[in-house]
Image (spheres, rainbow, N blue to C red):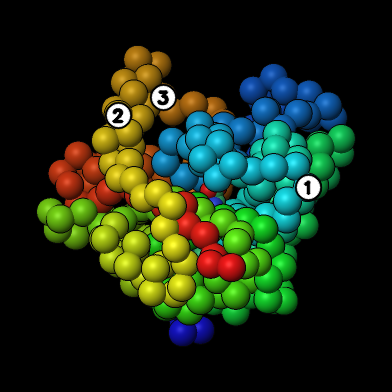
Amino acid sequence: MEETLGTVTSHYARHGELTARILAALAAAGKDTNALELEDLTPLDQFHLRGHQATRELAEEAGLAPGQRLLDIGSGIGGPARMLAQDYGVAVTAVDLTEAFCRTAAELSALVPEAPAPAFVCADATRLPFPAGRFDVVWTQHAAMNIPDKPALYRECLRVCRPGGRFLVYDVVEGPAGDPYYPAPWASTPSGSFLVEAAELRRLVLAAGFRERAFRDLTAAAVAWNRERQTRMADTGTQPALGPHLLMGPEFPQMIANVGRGLEEGRLGLATGLFEKPD
Ligand SMILES: C[S@@+](CC[C@H](N)C(=O)[O-])C[C@H]1O[C@@H](n2cnc3c(N)ncnc32)[C@H](O)[C@@H]1O
């Protein structure tokens, strides 16, 4: 268990001091780092398939309302958390296992002082440090693939959600065509990767005690998004200056190529579900 947590955090914390690197990249891209807006960070702080577009779609689907308390589990460097707080007026708590990501998340928020700042907490999603029923919405994008004990994960999601509250999942899943390729953005080797098929993800969430409102296969949308990105990179001959490679280092192009190949070959899929906790 502790070994798995260590494998996951050393995968994500692989690339040293993040905030300084991000600031240097922003400055090189012509941004005034003393007057940043959240939109300046968007190309690099939404670490999941389909980027900020996916976060916005999910927020609309979840029916977020101002003043709701939202918990983002596996929040990375905080892009979705910041966006949800600013654009939907929700009070966001963001929890992540990787200390370096939590630190950078808070440092990036401090660089945009006029935007509402989420509370960033470093903790394991299977042992959440929050009381029962604390949140109106529990939200997670692309974190479950690092978590082997999914019953514990979804049990904790249910516990901290208030009765009648919502649970939103957006995750990479296993496809029918065989093992994924590594390194992947979420794991350098299979030892840090715990994918399940979409049907199993849905079963696990329901088994925890949630009720389903919607469940969708988004694999086709992920394939289209990935092809578009590849075309753009082929046209310019390079990856964009601002992107998640700033977090993951020189192996990132290989990681992302492996995801593209996995999606094309049916080894990977993308699924989303909106659930609620019964009253
Ligand atoms: C691919 S990133 C996604 C980050 C963010 N959700 C986003 O979409 O930008 C996965 C994140 O999950 C976090 N994570 C993995 N296992 C976790 C656990 N057991 N508890 C909390 N966070 C975890 C990692 O540290 C990493 O920041």
* Label 3 – label 2 distance at C-alpha: 19 Å
Query: Can you give x and y, in whole percent of width and height, for residue 190 in the image?
Result: 30, 67
Quadrant hosting residue 15: bottom right
User: Does the rendering let one see residue 251?
Assistant: no
Q: Considering the numbered disc 1 on the image, is that residue within a helix, a strand or a loop?
A: loop
The residue positioned 52% from the left and 60% from the top of the image is 276
Query: Can you give x and y, in whole percent of width and height, for residue 46 in the image?
Result: 55, 41
Quarter of the image that includes the C terminus: bottom right
How many numbered marks appear? 3
Which residue was labeled with disc 2? 224
User: Does the rendering let one see residue 116?
Assistant: yes
Q: Earlier in the sequence, mark 3 or mark 2?
A: 2
Q: Nearer the viewer, residue 210 or 242?
A: 210
Up/down of 176 relative to 9, above or below: above
Mark 1 Cα shell of 10 Å, populated few (<14), some (14-19), many (≥20):
few
> Which amino acid does the dot numbered 3 rest on?
Thr
> Is disc 3's CB within 8 Å of ligand 1?
no
> Which amino acid does the dot numbered 1 rest on?
Gly
Mark 3 Cα shell of 10 Å, populated few (<14), some (14-19), many (≥20):
few
The residue positioned 50% from the left and 31% from the top of the image is 53
Is 160 left or right of 113, judged from the image as shown? left
Up/down of 69 relative to 231, above or below: below
Which residue was labeled with disc 3? 238
> Which amino acid does the dot numbered 2 rest on?
Ala
Quadrant hosting residue 256: top left
Quadrant hosting residue 55: top right
Query: Can you give x and y, in whole percent of width and height, for residue 200 in the image?
Result: 28, 66
Query: Can you give x and y, in whole percent of width and height, for residue 176 in the image?
Result: 15, 55
